Amino acid sequence: MNQLILGDNLEIMRKMDSESIDLIYLDPPFFSNRNYEVIWGDKGEVRSFEDRWSGGVDHYIAWLKERVAEMHRLLKPTGSIYLHCDWHADAYIRVFILDKLFGENNFRNKITWKRATTHNDSKQGAKHFGRVCDYIFLYNKDYRLAKFNTIFEDYTKEYIEASYNKIDSKTGQHFKASDLSAAKPGGDTYYEWNGKFPPKNRYWAYSKDNMQKFEDEGRIYYSTTGKPYLKHFIEDMPGVSIDDLWLNCNFKTKSERIGYPTQKPEALMTRVIKSASNEGDTVFDPFVGGGTTVVVADKLKRNWIGIDQSVQAVKVSEMRLNNEQNLFSAPFSVTLHRYDYDTLRYKDAFEFEKFIVEQFGGLANIKQRSDLGLDGKTREGIPIQVKRSDNIGRNVIDNFHSALMRYDKALYERNKADSLPIGFIIAFSFGKGAVQEVARLKNEENVTIKLVNVEDIIPIAKKPRLTVKINDLDSPSNKRGSGGVSLREIEFIAIGESDAGVEFYSWDFEYNEEEKKFKASIMIDKEGRQQHKFKPGTHSIAVKAVDNEGLEAIEVVKVKVNGVVERG
């Protein structure tokens, strides 16, 4: 399943399967020795920043090398890694990390990417040329096996006008003409064609049969002297294959930007992902940042995994994905440090059973019927039952006990004889009757049933509390919208409370209450205060408060605009 994971990528990668990833793109924090490297400012990112900067460049390289070593283990033999960096440490990264771990023979390219903006500092008296480029190293796990898809750019208008300057009289298509003669022979290549032999000391480039095929297809152009040329129609050409200087990979629209300072353009990630993976492959970004890698991978029908230490990075990436999701999009999960009780308690029952069994370290039952109420088993084969409920009673114990005897009598008797658990029940809490019956079975019948609280498996917390105030900022506005419609400006103030601390707010000013899908108009609002202009009518506005654990609360406000503002 596609996954966004909050946490230290090193710890998480160590738990991932070897040779399970097709493509890795990483854009680690640059070795810039500047505090602007802390972008989101939440606790996870600040902690990571401090760890990375406890020593100079040697410490930075050691910090990064440890992580890239895990990435090398995760890559399939056919896989590739793209590592994005700038001039501060590119030489160190290549020599001391990539060459050491991947081998010099698996180096493919040092790609130069020209950003849309320059880091010049000329106004501050910098004595150097403007720095407008980042660098992306491409290495294969094994260059002999690696996947690579050639990427083409469209021809420029100037190139088309200069080269494809002839027009087919029958079809009206633009084409360019190439010489049909060659310097060296290659089989049946010396013959008379259209009353002419090849020029002196030359041969036809194709056999007579192929020349006839071109003629029948209308693909031969004759000059005024009767010399034949092959027509190359612009529609048949793939474009110009790209090289290692990337100049046209910048943001296409303002709306693509989310306010994340080091956000990478979708055009850049599209080029990376298309070049080294195919549909259905798995793309991994261990420093997910603003989420561009996973968003583009999702659009291109790749599987993906994204990790970040920052709550805000993970939640913003989640919102970007939600904004792009449609009926054909694959589902994805978000793994946080803590889980919201209400979300888990009222989650789809089968999804919850599968999730909690796997978190317990077991194997979920893929059947939903005729399973005797058993939802999975441990890796030793001991049955597991999940109850998405609180205060589980004695009747659940009785039914579970009976089901286990019917399910596998031999396993039941063997575990009982060895004083091992005959089964596990997982629930949010257990009542007095259930606890007493488990104790009785143990004492009187030597039958051990283990009761496991959900909170013993995963940490649970309460989501933030959220209220919203609204202020009408003016009488009907004199400002007119499109079509001369009066607009009214309204202020919204979100007040969130959380034991973990509210990190940021997000707003959806066109919330669809029927679909119940939050699509952020504004993703990052640190203050919780927004002003928006509305046309007359009823509007639904949703706001989210996201706390430092990644838990969130949502509040929906309805306002009616018609001369005055009324709250629905």
Image (cartoon, grey):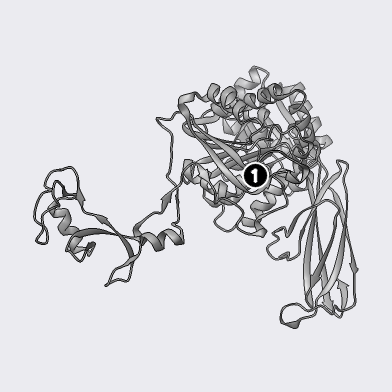
Between residues 417 and 59, which one lies in front from this camera angle? Answer: 59
Name which quarter of the figure residue 51 lies in.
top right
Q: Residues within 10 Å of mark 1 (few under 14, many from 20)?
A: few
Identify which residue is drawn at 80% across, 76% down. 487
What amino acid is found at the position of numbered circle 1 in the picture? Ser
What is the x, y in percent for residue 261?
72, 47
Q: Is residue 36 visible?
A: yes
Residue with the mark numbered 1: 333
Q: Who's the residue at 68% across and 54% down the image?
A: 257
- Quarter of the image with the C terminus is bottom right
Q: Quadrant of residue 402?
A: top right
Q: For residue 380, say whether it is visible.
A: no
Label 1: state its secondary structure.
Answer: strand
Q: Is residue 513 left or right of residue 198?
A: right
Q: Is residue 467 above or below residue 536?
A: above
Q: Position of residue 394 (x, y in %)?
A: 77, 37
The picture quadrant where one finds residue 127 is: top right
In the image, is residue 66 above or below residue 340?
Answer: above
Q: Is residue 348 above or below residue 78?
A: below
Across and down, in percent, residue 414 comes to 60, 20
